[in-house]
Amino acid sequence: MKEKNIKLLNDKINREFSKEKLILGHGNLTSPIVLIGEAPGAKEIELGQPFVGQAGKHFDEFLQVLEINRKDVYITNTVKYRPTKLNPKTGRLSNRTPTIKEIDNFRDYLYEEIHIIDPKIIVTLGNTPLKGIFNEDLKIGEVHGNLMEKNIEDNLYKIFPLYHPAAVIYRRELKEVYMRDLLVLKEIIKKL
């Protein structure tokens, strides 16, 4: 049933955003854990999967700390296509943070996706999925590592906000905080 419902949802998303190259949710449909990222990057678009390339390396380390296999979780993004901007120095497209409008455009789909998977915990990776879930101006720096709750389609879900795994690439000082948050999450997951 979940497989059929995800397929119907993905078909809806593909129809609405038919002009975009989309990366849809991927993984175990019966997973107790849903991981939500920001949006696909160039490598994700190229390979057709979320969290591959440089961000994928950090994501794999994240899973190792949690002692979870990638095949055992469901992974999706808040925005399902790659938001880009023209880099004036190189003349090539580079990633950009999704706009509020882009986040809003995908929110109902994200909620439906969560409802179909029906996880025991949702892990948001960075500010964008936090905004996608809560539809508020929450900041990851203020709520990371704290277990929260959100009612989505008449179900109360546990939400655990984390910094995005790639944030550690750009802000080395986050590594210690990030690792501490992962250990808290690991203990929560053990009790699911």
Image (tube, rainbow, N blue to C red):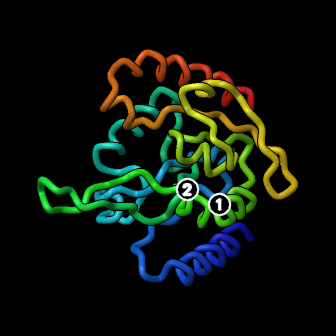
Is residue 125 left or right of 148 when viewed as pictured? left
- What is the number of callouts on the image? 2
Of the residues shown, which amino acid type is indicated by label 1? Arg
Of the residues shown, which amino acid type is indicated by label 2? Ile
Residue 95 sits in which quadrant?
bottom left
Mark 2 is surrounded, within 10 Å at the Cα level, by few (under 14), some (14 to 19) or many (20 or more) other residues, namely: few
Residue 25, visible in the rendered structure: no
User: How far across and how far down the image is residue 78, in percent?
Assistant: 55, 55
Is residue 52 left or right of 31 when viewed as pictured? left
User: How far across and how far down the image is residue 119, in percent?
Assistant: 72, 48
Mark 1 is surrounded, within 10 Å at the Cα level, by few (under 14), some (14 to 19) or many (20 or more) other residues, namely: many
Residue 22 sits in which quadrant?
bottom left
Outermost residue, front direction? 88
- Residue 7's disc number: none
Mark 2 = which residue? 100
Give the CA separation, mark 1 to mark 2. 10 Å
Residue occupying image coordinates x 68% and y 49% = 135
Which quadrant of the figure contains the N terminus?
A: bottom right
Mark 1 = which residue? 107
User: How far across and how far down the image is residue 23, in percent?
Assistant: 45, 65
Say above or below: 64 vs 39. Answer: above
Residue occupying image coordinates x 56% and y 32% = 140
Is residue 176 left or right of 102 when viewed as pictured? left
